[in-house]
Image (cartoon, rainbow, N blue to C red):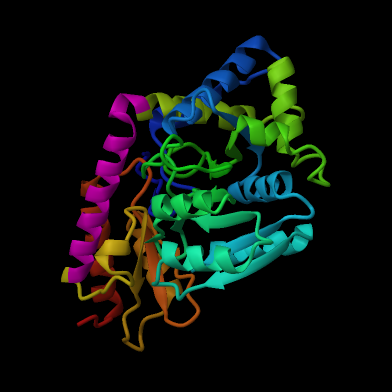
Amino acid sequence: MASSAPILLTPGPLTTSERTRAAMLTDWGSWDGSFNGLTASLCDKLVAIANGSGSHACVPLQGSGTFAVEAAVGTFVPRTGKMLVLVNGAYGKRLAKICEMLGRDHSVYETPEDVPTTPEAVDRLLAEDRAVTHVGLIHCETSTGILNPLPEIATVVARHGRRLIIDAMSSFGALPIDARAVPFEALIAASGKCLEGVPGMGFVLAREEALLAAEGNIASLALDLRDQHLYMQRTGQWRFTPPTHVVAALHEALLQYEDEGGLPARHARYARNCETLIAGMRRLGLRSFLPPEIQAPIIVTFHAPRDGRYRFADFYQAVRAKGFILYPGKLTQVETFRVGCIGAVEPTDMERAVEAVAETFRELRIETL
């Protein structure tokens, strides 16, 4: 990073490598064969991360991850279908809002923000409501960093003959999701998260047969994943102007992902970042919101100091001046702030961030113990 650029300890956008940023210095023709080859290679690499080659297809989409979530719900949930939305944070609530806006029947099962959804609860809910055709799950809820038990829930959903849509925005590429072992109809992620690309492209990994069967479900032209997939299969091109520089950056980020050692290495680095962060903040007297057993190594929510002199805006600006950008809390019941563990950062960066927080508390005369 240039010395003037702060390190983004956020859940995306996040700090990217120099190689990734340099990949955006080339202009690409959207119909050019070289760009079509780049898109095809990118999609193959994304499918391979989920071990879905031969059964699943990658459908890229312009826009943020939420665009891809809305596209997946509209494409795969029939207009006569019903989704059970599992909620323990802001992004589960957003998924329910998408169902409402699309006119899809849905029910919500909500647990507190520090309580994972259990497979037993899903088993009971599906047995009670035969109208449910799909289940929507946030794998890692970014509003807190909580990890929901995806493999166990996927097994229950499959046993009931229902279909699973996974929002894996903050987990894909860092936490294992094996399409051979975890049955799902669609998995949604984006370029600017654990793959360490830049924002601007969402994507959906979907069963090929589900894509072909989704004709007529969606009332949107731009968000029709089936049509996007069939057009790309036929022409190698995107239907509408693609985010060429974002695609190039993500492809380069995936080459670095492979160089690093793939998912196991990416997970291990993020886990070290998370452990370093939590241990350092604990020494400062700050408590993490979640217990270790449900804390994903993606983003950590911390209780704010109870000192009356603490104001997040002042705290944020002072830490930023020392080279680190943090994230505000997203909880409604308690005051918190969040620190991301993902991106092109190392444990040494987390140590420096902790020291920046300590210096800020001293400067602002904020007591934490």
**Could you say which is closer to the camera, residue 270 or residue 27?**
270
Q: Which residue shows up at 54% across the image and 27% down it? A: 55
Q: Position of residue 197 (x, y in %)?
A: 48, 36
Quarter of the image containing the N terminus?
top left
- Segment colored magenta: 258-282
Q: Within the magenta stretch, is there residue 22?
A: no
> x and y percent of residue 214 in the render?
74, 39
Image point (22%, 49%), residue name: 272
Residue 118 visible to the viewer? no
- View extreme (left): residue: 283
Name the one closer to the observer, 200 or 109.
109
- The residue drawn where x is 59% and y is 69% is 128
In this rendering, position of residue 224 left or right of residue 180 = right
Q: Which quadrant of the rendered structure holds the C terminus?
A: bottom left
Q: Is residue 335 visible?
A: yes
The image shows residue 146, relative to residue 19, as above or below, that is: below
In the image, taking residue 113 as reference, residue 162 lies left or right, namely right
Helix, strand or loop: magenta stretch: helix
Q: In the image shown, does 38 or 218 lie closer to the viewer?
A: 218
Q: Residue furthest bottom?
A: 308
Q: Residue furthest top?
A: 33
Asked if the magenta segment contains residue 261, the reply would be: yes
- Indicate left or right for 113 with 258 as reference: right
Counting from the top left corner in percent of width and height, residue 207 is at 59, 34
Residue 15 x, y percent position in the rendering: 41, 44
How many numbered discs?
A: 0
Residue placed most toward the observer, 234 or 337:
234
The residue at 76%/31% (across/down) is: 227
